[in-house]
Image: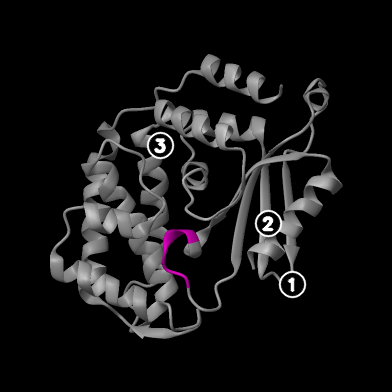
Amino acid sequence: MEEKILHYLTDIQTEEDIQILLACETGSRAWGFPSPDSDYDVRFIYKHKKDWYLSLNEKKDTIERMFENNEFDLSGWDLRKCLLLLLKSNPPLLERIQSPIVYMADQNFLSEINVLAQSCYSKIATMYHYLSMSKKMYSEIQGKENIKLKKLFYALRTAIACKWIEEKDEIPPIVFQKMLNELTIETHLKQRILELIELKATKNENYLHNQEPEIGKFIENCIVQAENISKSLPASKGNIEELNSFFTRSLQ
């Protein structure tokens, strides 16, 4: 699969006349709980030649491609767009630059943007994102007798990310099991979650599973706690001049 993805990325570089600075996997494969039929959610950051940016005309700053009946979903953001999102501590971007599955990367770019991400990190912006996602995902399974494991894990991952923001002074990791291992969660509950990860790895995404009341209660508690503390969290420390400097260097 990696060879196929690299082929698609190389074609996009040629067709769009861009340079890909980072291409990685996101979604369930990067989070660490894929199903056998999970698709490939490939996200990339790219830059144009310097002259492309020297215009007052608004230009498209995203690239979207789908291949093989949507099994391969490739989506890219222009460098300038990414840095403006980084200034806002955009969680999907923060996840991408941490992905454990990397297809293409300029290592100097990747190292430096991760350092910048730390300086731009906003607990309140990140908390609001994960809290909103967790509430939305949990509302879709709450009270139902049978649920999709995919939706349970979407609600659980974002709830645990909220708990991470509360307990840690670091950006939430993209790898779900890292959060699970390092947070204060009862041992038997951790074990049940790990069992469900193993089960999910054997079941297609349409598989229906009995409700997990204890995990549901845990999600609810995370949501309530996040709502209670969210307004008092610190905002971003991002520096636009620091990002401008990085942007200029990256275009050389």
Disc on the earlier residue, 1 or 3: 1
Q: Using a 10 Å C-alpha cutoff, classify the residue at mark 1 as few (fewer than 14 neighbours), some (14 to 19) or many (20 or more).
A: few
Distance from disc 1 to disc 2, alpha carbons, whole Å, reads 11 Å
Of circles 2 and 3, the one toward us is: 2
Q: Using a 10 Å C-alpha cutoff, classify the residue at mark 2 as few (fewer than 14 neighbours), some (14 to 19) or many (20 or more).
A: many
Question: 28 and 228: which one is in front?
Answer: 28
Q: Are marks 1 and 2 in contact (CB under 8 Å)?
A: no
Distance from disc 2 to disc 3, alpha carbons, whole Å, reads 26 Å
Q: Secondary structure at mark 1?
A: loop
Distance from disc 1 to disc 3, alpha carbons, whole Å, reads 36 Å
Query: Magenta stretch: residue 76 in it?
Result: no
Task: Looking at this view, name the residue that lies furthest to the right.
Answer: 15
Identify the mark at residue 125; answer none if there is no mark.
3
**Where does label 1 land, which residue?**
68
Could you tell me the amino acid type at mark 3? Ala
Identify the mark at residue 74; answer none if there is no mark.
2
**Where is the C terminus found, in terms of image quarters?**
top right
Q: Residue, x 23% and y 74% (percent of image)?
A: 192
